[in-house]
Image (tube, rainbow, N blue to C red):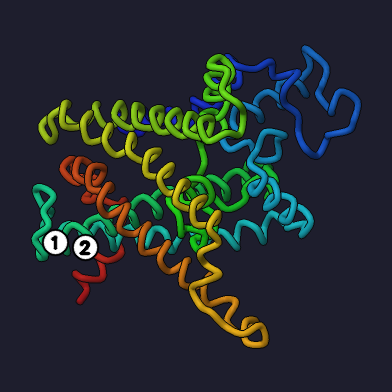
């Protein structure tokens, strides 16, 4: 309960940023109402204004709003064009929620019988165990957030009268995860992407840094990860007593979240360098008549190297994150009903 309450920052931060750094009536509007009088903003002191404001502060990702991520709003537009029936939407989301529950339950049951390494080591047996535990933690995060999101979507649409198109997929396409930047920018949930951008834009403006420059990109990254790291530390600090020293918690969260911008910028620089030298064109030298048959080979090779790089990056840096979560016992928290435990007893 304490961790859940402390973790609510992920929903509160977007609302606070929109109220403190913007004039909502001037800066925000629903994309479906763009072009209407006053961009469809309702009159003051009306119930329509209350509903408009409530929708604004409760949409963490800005779904359907002018400030929402382009891909998220594109997904919403696609869903709206399909004119999804609410009942069919709920039935379609139910298997995702069930699958997430079953997988999360399996992860917890597996983690309970898995030895957690005490520290990082390059010794092969220990390294294999670290990789396995990190994969369990990754699955735990993915399935937990998916389960929460899908249940919220079903309840909102099926019971509270929400619209299906306001619940596009939480995560992006995993095929895009061939760079660290894509993992965070395209695949991950993006709950704090917009508020972090709002805060970093203020920093960039006051430091007179050219917009869309590498320096501005770095400011955006360091701002987002600093905010995330601080609140992750804060959320865990309320339950870490007896499991992890607060200084260790602060150090691990600080290291994991602080190093992500630097890794992303190094990656960005390498990509720019490679594109500048057009090196991929020389991976395979063919005659013009043969080249079309092999055009995809360099891209496939580069993507494969990218996936390998991302895997190694998160195995190395992810241990700082996973170590404290595992020590607190997050991987072993009980499910309300464990299907795997019931099945095991039946057998």
Q: Closest to the observer: 281 or 260?
A: 281
Up the image or down, 103 lies above or below 198; here it is below
Neighbour tally class for label 2: few under 14, some 14-19, many 20 plus, Cα within 10 Å? some
Which residue is at the far right?
37
Up the image or down, 304 lies above or below 231; here it is below
Residue occupying image coordinates x 38% and y 28%: 226
Tag 2 secondary structure: helix
Which residue is at the far bottom?
289
Residue occupying image coordinates x 49% and y 57%: 274
- Image quarter where the N terminus lies is top left
The residue to which callout 1 is attached is 113
The residue to which callout 2 is attached is 110
Q: Is residue 147 visible?
A: no
CB under 8 Å between callouts 1 and 2? Answer: yes
Q: Is residue 84 visible?
A: yes
Q: Closest to the observer: 306 or 293?
A: 293
Relative placement, left or right, of 119 versus 227 is: left
Q: Closest to the observer: 294 or 329?
A: 294
Relative placement, left or right, of 143 versus 46 is: left
* Residue 273, position as x, y percentages in the image: 49, 52
């Amino acid at each position: 309960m304490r961790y859940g309450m402390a973790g609510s920052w992920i929903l509160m931060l977007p609302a606070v940023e929109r109220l403190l750094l913007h004039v909502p009536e001037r800066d925000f509007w629903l994309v479906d109402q763009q072009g209407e009088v006053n961009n469809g903003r309702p009159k003051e002191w009306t119930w329509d204004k209350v509903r408009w404001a409530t929708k604004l502060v409760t949409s963490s990702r800005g779904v359907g709003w002018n400030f929402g991520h382009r891909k998220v709003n594109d997904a919403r537009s696609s869903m709206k064009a399909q004119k999804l029936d609410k009942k069919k939407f709920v039935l379609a989301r139910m298997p995702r929620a069930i699958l997430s529950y079953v997988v999360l339950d399996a992860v917890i049951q597996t983690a309970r019988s898995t030895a957690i390494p005490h520290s990082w080591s390059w010794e092969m047996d220990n390294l294999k165990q670290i990789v396995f535990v990190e994969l369990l933690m990754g699955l735990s995060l993915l399935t937990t957030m998916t389960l929460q999101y899908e249940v919220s979507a079903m309840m909102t649409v099926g019971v509270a009268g929400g619209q299906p198109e306001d619940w596009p997929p939480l995560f992006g396409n995993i095929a895009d995860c061939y760079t660290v930047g894509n993992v965070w920018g395209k695949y991950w949930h993006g709950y704090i992407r917009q508020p972090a951008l709002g805060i970093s834009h203020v920093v960039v403006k006051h430091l007179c840094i050219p917009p869309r420059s590498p320096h501005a990109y770095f400011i955006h990254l360091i701002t987002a990860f600093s905010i995330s790291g601080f609140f992750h530390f804060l959320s865990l600090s309320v339950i870490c007593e007896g499991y992890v020293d607060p200084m260790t918690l602060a150090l691990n969260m600080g290291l994991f979240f602080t190093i992500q911008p630097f890794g992303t910028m190094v990656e960005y620089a390498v990509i720019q360098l490679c594109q500048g030298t057009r090196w991929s064109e020389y991976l395979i030298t063919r005659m013009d008549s043969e080249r079309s048959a092999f055009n995809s080979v360099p891209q496939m090779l580069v993507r494969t190297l990218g996936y390998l790089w991302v895997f190694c990056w998160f195995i190395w840096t992810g241990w700082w994150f996973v170590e404290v979560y595992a020590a607190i016992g997050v991987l072993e928290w009980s499910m309300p009903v464990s299907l795997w435990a019931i099945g095991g007893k039946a057998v």
